[in-house]
Image (cartoon, helix red, strand yellow):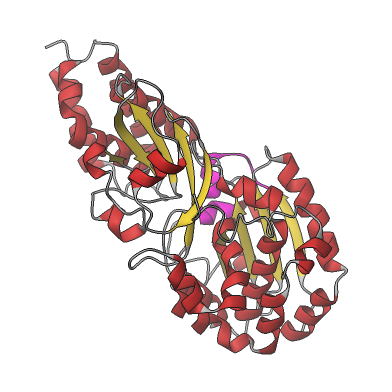
Amino acid sequence: MEHLNQVLLHENSRVGPDLEAWLAHGGGAGLEIALQEPAALIPLIKESGLRGLGGSGFPTHRKWTAVAEKKHSKEKYLICNGNEDEPGTFKDRILLEETPHQVIEGAMIAALATGINRIVFYINPDIEDAIANMQSSVAQWEGSDFYLKVSDQIQQPLDFSILRSSGHYIGGEETAAIESVEKKFPFPRRKPPFPAENGVHGCPTLIDNIETLSNVSHIVKNGAKWYQDLGIGNACGTKIYSLSGDILSPGVYELPMGTSLSDLINIYGGGMLVNKKLKAVFTGGPSNTLLTPKDLDVPLDFDSVAARRSSLGTGAMIVVSEGTGIVKRVAEYVSFFAHSSCGQCPPCKTGTYYIAMLLNKIDMGQGRRADLEALINLCEILPGSGRCALINGAVKVLESSLYHFMGEYEHSLKD
């Protein structure tokens, strides 16, 4: 268990809203370095290999560069995305509640690197403790010398705000978050234009996940090679895995990126529940794909998981055991997406509803071969038909379950 809580969840980071404790344990050192040479920050983040840890795995430096290049804009925004409303994902809650200062310091460094002057902490309204701790923490930073130094560097006052998200799952999509910041309903926008070009009130906007930002101060303080060496194989850094389901020790585990699925379940998660055998793992939450027992050896990093027709996503791992109906579980997840659809794209709203209806029909033993064929056809025609990725996520988990468990679907049919 020596790899647990290496960086983000280390006890020195989990100081709650106490800024003095954060600084006493080495906090602020990354920001001091950043203030000395802001121009070196994006090259450093690029060298480190930091990627978006909210699900996309997109190289962080590319987002930062796109916003930094908009040098003539007087207003730039950073949205620190803590909406986190997907079943099985609960890492950002821990970071916001227990490590608010590493989130804030990372955001301030991002502001220095890109010339951002407005930082919005966009947080799920259901995690009240996280919101309270962030409010207290932000107030302490605003009264610190660091705040004045950063404001001087960007040549205008740094503006912090804390915004409760709508609480809708779709509110975590980056353009929906922009709509929320503009005090509108979180309808996702079509892209392009991308947020770096036309974000909040038309200003260049950077949207980063809470876990991504939490890494920034540590990278600046310790260097790119230090971060690279934390991972296993070709992977860089650590990853917080949200582990739940039919295991003995569910929870959040910060481990080297590239830790095997077997180690996560059997060593850190304590193994399967008594007398239970592994059937499948929903990776990255229910909007992604399944792994099966033959994949226990897979390293849990973006590229290795993708090579198994799956996706790391947010790092959520929902473990299901033999005896659990895959059709029923997929029906539950697609019903969640149907309920979460914002409704502005008819293929998404009606498509998720229709998929859920067919899945429930098959699960109850009332489905026919035509219903199964309809599901297969929907997997071909629905992807890409919405403004955001919600419909893609619903189809992805369905398609993956059909690929791995077609026999279970066929066994449930009436004909």
Q: Is residue 316 magenta?
A: no
Q: Residue at x 29, y 11 (%)?
A: 364
Q: Residue at x 32, y 18 (%)?
A: 360
Q: Position of residue 277 (x, y in %)?
A: 30, 26
Quarter of the image with the C terminus in it: top left
Q: Is residue 393 above or below residue 360?
A: below
Q: Residue at x 66, y 76 (%)?
A: 30
Q: Position of residue 269 (x, y in %)?
A: 45, 38
Span highlighted in magenta in the image:
164-177
Viewer-nearest residue: 256 or 127: 256
Viewer-nearest residue: 375 or 121: 121
Res 349 → quadrant? top left
Residue 388 visible to an observer of this rendering: yes
Res 198 → quadrant? bottom right
Q: Position of residue 402 (x, y in %)?
A: 21, 33
Left or right, 223 with respect to 15, comes to left
Q: Is residue 169 magenta?
A: yes
Q: Is residue 179 above or below residue 21?
A: above
Given the current orientation, which residue lies at the most extreme front position?
A: 2
Q: Residue at x 53, y 74 (%)?
A: 64
Res 275 → quadrant? top left
Residue 203 visible to an observer of this rendering: no
Q: Position of residue 82 (x, y in %)?
A: 61, 51
Given the current orientation, which residue lies at the most extreme right position?
A: 143
Given the current orientation, which residue lies at the most extreme left position?
A: 415
